[in-house]
Image (tube, grey):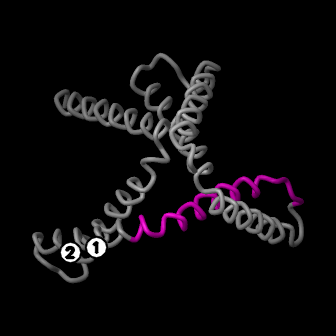
């Protein structure tokens, strides 16, 4: 049992280190890495879909299932890169929609329907603006989300800080500003 816990702990530490490195890269170079990230996510999703279809629906052998997974993964990776603005729209829409749902509306009558309609309208407007100004939106999104996730990963690794301390949020803010400055300097043309 101790050996299993030791291996599990080591794997957890390795995953946190990898996550920390990825989120720092996202914070500092998110715009440059955005299409790669889209392609990677598309490939992984396509590979898993192809693998599951091949094994469960078509009952193919493992080797052919992997081949089908790779083929579908490549197709979805290419589509993700070509259609990355759809992803920008969906990201901005979902963030704006969820934030708009936090607007306090009365809980009686048809207000819940009105709240969803207003939130959807706000989401569509913000999504369209995000597509129009995609470079700054991607830079802001990757800097802020990268800093939040990097500090969270660091907190999990070190144990020195927690989300209950003001220093936690100060580090997130400082790292986000550094990421914004670095990315805006590197991407002046956009």
In this view, the residue in front, 131 or 44, is 131
Give how far across and how far down residue 27 sits, in percent. 50, 37
Q: Is residue 175 magenta?
A: no
User: In x, y percent, where is residue 98?
Assistant: 69, 56
Residue drawn at x 33%, y 36% is 18
Q: Which residue is mark 1?
A: 72
Quick one: label 2, few (<14), some, or many (20+) residues within 10 Å? many
| Residue at figure coordinates x 60%, y 18% from the top left | 167
Question: Is residue 116 placed above or below 60 in the rendered structure?
Answer: above
**Labels in figure, total:** 2
Counting from the top left corner in percent of width and height, residue 184 is at 58, 39
Q: Quadrant of residue 153?
A: top left
Q: Residue 168 occupies which quadrant of the picture? A: top right
Where does the magenta region start and end?
A: 79-106
Look at 10% across and 70% down and name the residue there: 63
- Residue 69 horizontal/vertical position (percent): 23, 70
Q: Give the structural element (helix, strand or loop) at label 1.
A: helix
Q: Which residue is under mark 2?
A: 68
Q: Which secondary structure class fits the magenta region best? A: helix
Q: Nearer the viewer, residue 108 or 176?
A: 176
């Amino acid at each position: 049992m101790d050996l299993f816990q030791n291996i599990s702990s080591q794997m957890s530490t390795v995953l946190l280190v990898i996550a920390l490195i990825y989120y720092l890269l996202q914070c500092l170079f998110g715009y440059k890495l955005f299409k790669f990230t889209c392609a990677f996510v598309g490939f992984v999703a396509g590979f898993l879909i192809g693998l599951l279809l091949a094994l469960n629906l078509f009952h193919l052998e493992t080797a052919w299932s992997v081949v089908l997974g790779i083929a579908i993964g490549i197709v979805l990776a290419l589509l993700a890169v070509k259609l990355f603005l759809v992803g920008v729209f969906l990201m901005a829409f979902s963030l704006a929609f969820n934030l708009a749902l936090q607007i306090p509306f009365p809980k009686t009558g048809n207000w819940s329907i009105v709240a969803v309609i207003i939130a959807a309208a706000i989401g569509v407007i913000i999504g369209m603006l995000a597509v129009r100004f995609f470079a700054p939106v991607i830079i802001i999104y990757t800097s802020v989300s990268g800093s939040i996730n990097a500090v969270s990963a660091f907190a999990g690794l070190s144990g020195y800080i927690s989300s209950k301390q003001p220093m936690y949020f100060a580090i997130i803010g400082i790292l986000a500003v550094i990421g914004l400055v670095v990315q805006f300097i590197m991407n002046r043309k956009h």
